[in-house]
């Protein structure tokens, strides 16, 4: 297995070197919008600790990452009136991983609507900002319950 590369795009986002439409952050994780969404509301959850893949992570980092993924998934169900949620996590190129900082995809799903292909085409920043705002609002509403 290859070593962790601190110049990957998600490490740069964590260091504030690249922008992201942040949805949620705590001491262990960061959640933000995928810039090439396969569904409206497609968010990513990453650990703040360097980890190339799931296989490299300490159990407490895995737990923190998936706690956040569940939080984002629940908010996405509300924010996007979703019928379901797809959670995806890929490891190494052969497993479908493209960015080599462990990450979890949270995709709101609607009956009869296929995921968009991973085209490499970026969504307009204003759409990502609006989707991030919807998720943050749903997270805030859930926190107030």
Image (cartoon, helix red, strand yellow):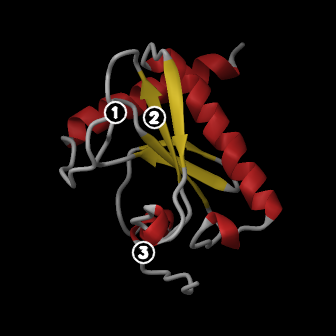
Q: Position of residue 78 (x, y in %)?
A: 52, 16
Horizontal side, residue 85 vs residue 132: left or right: right
Q: Position of residue 122 (x, y in %)?
A: 21, 49
Please tell me which residue lies in front, 103 or 84. 84
Residue at 45 percent of width and 65 percent of height: 10
Q: Is residue 68 above or below residue 62?
A: above
| C-alpha distance separating marks 1 and 3 | 24 Å
If you read the primary sequence from the N terminus, does the residue marked by circle 2 or circle 3 appear first? 3
In the image as oriented, which residue stretches furthest toward the front? 94
Residue 39 is tagged as: 1
Residue at 62 percent of width and 63 percent of height: 48
Residue 107 is tagged as: 2
Quarter the N terminus occupies: bottom right
Asked if the residue under mark 3 is in contact with the one under mark 1, i.e. CB atoms within 8 Å, the reply is: no
Horizontal side, residue 37 vs residue 99: left or right: left
Asked if the residue under mark 2 is in contact with the one under mark 1, i.e. CB atoms within 8 Å, the reply is: yes
Q: Badge 1: how crowded within 10 Å, few (<14), some, or many (20+)?
A: some
In the image as oriented, which residue stretches furthest toward the right? 60
Q: Is residue 15 above or below residue 4?
A: above
Q: Secondary structure at mark 3?
A: loop
* Residue 33 quadrant: top left
Q: Which residue is mark 3?
A: 8
Q: Badge 3: how crowded within 10 Å, few (<14), some, or many (20+)?
A: few
Residue at 18 percent of width and 50 percent of height: 121
Horizontal side, residue 29 vs residue 80: left or right: right
Q: Badge 2: how crowded within 10 Å, few (<14), some, or many (20+)?
A: many
Residue at 81 percent of width and 59 percent of height: 60
Task: Kindly report which numbered mark, 2 or 3, lies closer to the viewer in this rendering.
Answer: 2
Please tell me which residue lies in front, 128 or 121. 121
Q: Position of residue 19 (x, y in %)?
A: 35, 57
Q: Secondary structure at mark 1?
A: loop
If you read the primary sequence from the N terminus, does the residue marked by circle 1 or circle 3 appear first? 3
């Amino acid at each position: 297995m290859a070593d962790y590369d601190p110049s990957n795009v998600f490490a740069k986002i964590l260091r504030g070197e690249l922008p992201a439409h942040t949805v949620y952050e705590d001491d262990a994780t960061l959640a933000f919008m995928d810039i090439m969404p396969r569904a409206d509301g497609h968010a990513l959850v990453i650990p703040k600790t360097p980890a190339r893949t799931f296989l490299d992570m300490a159990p407490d980092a895995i737990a923190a990452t998936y706690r956040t993924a569940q939080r984002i998934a629940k908010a996405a169900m509300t924010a996007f009136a979703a019928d379901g949620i797809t959670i995806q996590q890929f490891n190494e190129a052969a497993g479908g991983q493209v960015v080599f900082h462990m990450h979890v995809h949270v995709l709101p799903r609607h009956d009869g609507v296929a995921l968009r292909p991973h085209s490499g085409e970026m969504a307009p920043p204003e759409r990502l900002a609006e989707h991030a705002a919807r998720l943050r609002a749903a997270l805030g509403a859930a926190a107030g319950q």
